[in-house]
Amino acid sequence: MAKMIDSILKYYLMKQIDHLETKIAFLSEYQPILIEGKKAILTSKLEKLAFKQKHQLLPYAIQAGKIDDYLKEAKAFEIKKVEEKFFWSHRALKQSLKRNQNQAAYDASLASITSKKDENIITIEAKYAASSNLQEAIQAYELVVSNQKNEFDQLKTRLEKNYDVFATNKKQLLETKLSKLNDKLQTTMKQFHRFKSADNQLESMIEPDTLLKLDNLSMHFGGLKAVDELSFSVKKGEIFGLIGPNGAGKTTVFNCITRFYKATSGQIYYRNHLNEPLNLNQFVVHNVIKEGIVRTFQNVELIWELPILENLLVAGHTLYRTGFIGQLFNSRRIKREEMIMRQKALKILSDLGLLAYQYSYPIGLPYGILKKIELARTLMVNPQLIILDEPAAGLNDAETNNLAHTIKKIRDDYQATIFLVEHDMGLVMEICDTVCAISFGKKLAIGTPKEIQSSKVVREAYLGGE
Amino acid sequence: MLYTVNRHLERKAKLHQVMHHPYFGFFVLGFLLLLVQIIRISGVNIPTTVLRGLGLTMIYIIIALGFSILLGYAGLASLGTAGFVGIGTYLIGYLTNAKGLSVSMILVIGFLGAIAIGTIVGFISLRIEGLYLGIITLGLSEILNEVFKNATAITNGTNGLLMNRIVLFGQYYQFNSNTIFIAIVFILIFVMILTLNIMKSPTGRAMLAMRNSESAAQAMGVSVLKYRLLAFIIATVYAFLGGILYMTYIGFSIPTTWNLAFSLFVLAAVIVGGSQSILGVVLGTFMIFGLDLAVFQQIPLFQENPAITFILNGVLIVVVVMFYPGGLARLITNLKYKITSLSKKLMKKWKAFKYGEDD
């Protein structure tokens, strides 16, 4: 009974920690976007006022006889209208001349329309030239101009002041909120750790600078040993390559890490962004991403019924904090979250040079682009470990080079560790810091690319021994 | 003057904003349906069968909207719709006739009951997929139908259950079907807005992801259990709401109405219309139910030979499914595109005729 209560409490605390972590991530990451949004509102308000003032000014300007840019524009607009009318009627006349060959009628009607046009232009010019009580009108005009300027300046200073107050307040508020949340998180973590006293040995299982460690991992399908007592560790910030001949069990290793398969025996240790050691064997498939592990698939698995941008939004699914009821009534909070997520997705797309495809559907796009979109999708959740399953499969040489560049860029810009399986040895040897070779589920060799290239065992596995 | 020109442009932009608001179409549809009632009140004699047909079509649209989320978004085919709608009708019928409960109370009970039943069926769907799920839900629906026939204390058996009044604020009211028609219009608009919100929200996207590739969805943090249950709960709640509205509008429920054919008709309506668009569901439901109920039954030829309506409906379904697999929604967008391109072409030709070819 006590054990059951313990497990319930532990579950509750885990949920609480999860909740707090997402809240902190949300607040700290999106603070600048929120404040920028306020600035956009400010500029739009000022623009609106300027537009309104321009229209208010117009009648005064006409009365004052001021042929400023605005009046010139208006006059030119009317004259252009008249000329356009003349142009079309002249064209119609030419057409009828072509049909009827009646020169006299053509001349007569042409003369009539030209005279009409001239008359119209004269009246327009007279209308704009007419001015009475010039002195008073000019004074009134200038008064209005100065009034408007005052109004504009007042609004501007007020809004800027408001904005400054808003920005500083928001920053302070967010900072206090963040510190409070962090405190709360730490206290709950402490409580949680008390429960975890049994698991405290985890800390000794995984070294401080190691991100992922497989410890004697085995996966058996009936009699087939797809992965057999495999153990290696991935350091933080490196590009780790896993190679091996077909059927060596590379994808099975990935599926064990991301919990699609439950390993027969052996442990998988992992350090999350709070530097807390975890045993991945205790996780469910859809919770692995919350610890910062994302993966791509061997065959591109995009959502074909959604445009690219929304594909990225699906990848950010775990970051949304509005509940179902809020989504049902399209609350302000979900709108704001949606805006923020869209901004983030657009930033990632522009980083990877995919911005042109944001509204297009994945169907019909080239394979290289689809692979890149899958890569972009992994970046939505600020990943710690990106697992790439054959990223270069089906790409040509140019696309592969591009991909190598992109992977390096992701490692540097997003501070993520990359763990990949690949058959393209050129790519592996070019970008990887460490390479591990396996065959029939067993580790052959691990080391730098050069060491692997010169390894005899690996060569035998690929080419066959004597 | 420029001033007026700018004002005109501004007004045009505002109109554009209103016209392209996602909810605009729902309000237009609601207005059109209310117009029928306004015409009736102003003195024109509209046959009651037409009004009844339109009212029933609206109720079926609500049921089909829930089903479209289940089929088009979560990718789960269920044939149990009829049973769930039937439960809704008997729920309100029994509770008002025997217990005298008020409508708001019944709505709450129905809501909770729908959540419970949706959860049960959702758990079944975790193990079984595709056609097998259809068969299981069909079995469930048939069991419910047998229960309706035999639980005479509640459902009055094969004679059907009558309900001619409802309880509101502790008092009995005998409602005119026209007032309920107007209430249904507003409920329909509300339900459409909610459905659109679900479809465009992260929930809708997560369901689509699940339908496209379950493993990719799981890798992105979508819990299959949660969203399957949610899809079933939404569909069941909509079906219950449809049943409650049906009973208040028609006032009579008989087990033979809630048979397999009804479930299949809802399925057909969603597929013919286009399972991922609200416009499609509305058009599909109108084609499957509304045409027969509100239009064909007014024509003497069809009144004499009711079998013809079935044949005509069947031919229409075959034609749409053969030539427009995307449903009526796709047909409408295609037509829109064709009409605009044709009008552009015609304008060009007319100008060339009037003013001559370009030099």
Image (cartoon, grey):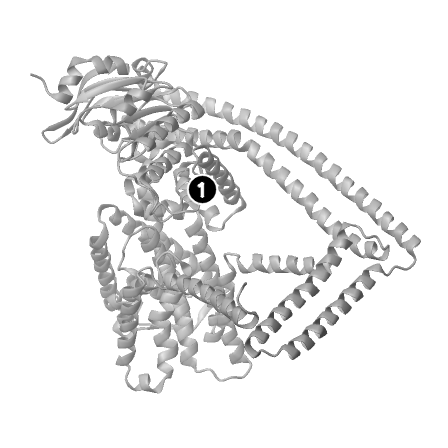
Does A85 sit above or below residue A277?
below
Quadrant for the C terminus of chain B in the image: bottom right
Q: Position of residue A59 (x, y in %)?
A: 81, 57
Q: Report which quarter residue A390 is drawn in.
A: top left
Q: Position of residue A171 (x, y in %)?
A: 61, 29
How many marks the image carries: the answer is 1
Q: Provide the chain ID for the residue under circle 1.
A: A
The residue that label 1 is drawn on is A356
Q: Which residue of the protein is positioned furthest toward the left in this rendering?
A: A466
Q: Is residue A357 left or right of residue A457?
A: right
Nearer the observer, B336 or A116? A116
Nearer the observer, B288 or B125? B288
Residue found 84% across the figure and 49% down from its top: A144
Q: Position of residue A436 (x, y in %)?
A: 24, 19
Q: Residues within 10 Å of mark 1 (few under 14, many from 20)?
A: few
Does A5 sit above or below residue A128?
above
Residue found 49% across the figure and 29% down from its top: A24
Does A180 sit above or below residue A158?
above
Report the amino acid beneath label 1. Answer: Ala
Q: Is residue B82 visible?
A: yes
Nearer the observer, A77 or A315? A77
Q: Report which quarter residue A126 is drawn in.
A: bottom right
Q: Report which quarter residue B146 is drawn in.
A: bottom left
Q: Position of residue B135 (x, y in %)?
A: 20, 57
Residue found 32% across the figure and 50% down from its top: B74
Q: Is residue B257 left or right of residue A82?
A: left
Residue found 29% across the figure and 43% down from its top: B213
Does B351 sit above or below residue A101?
above
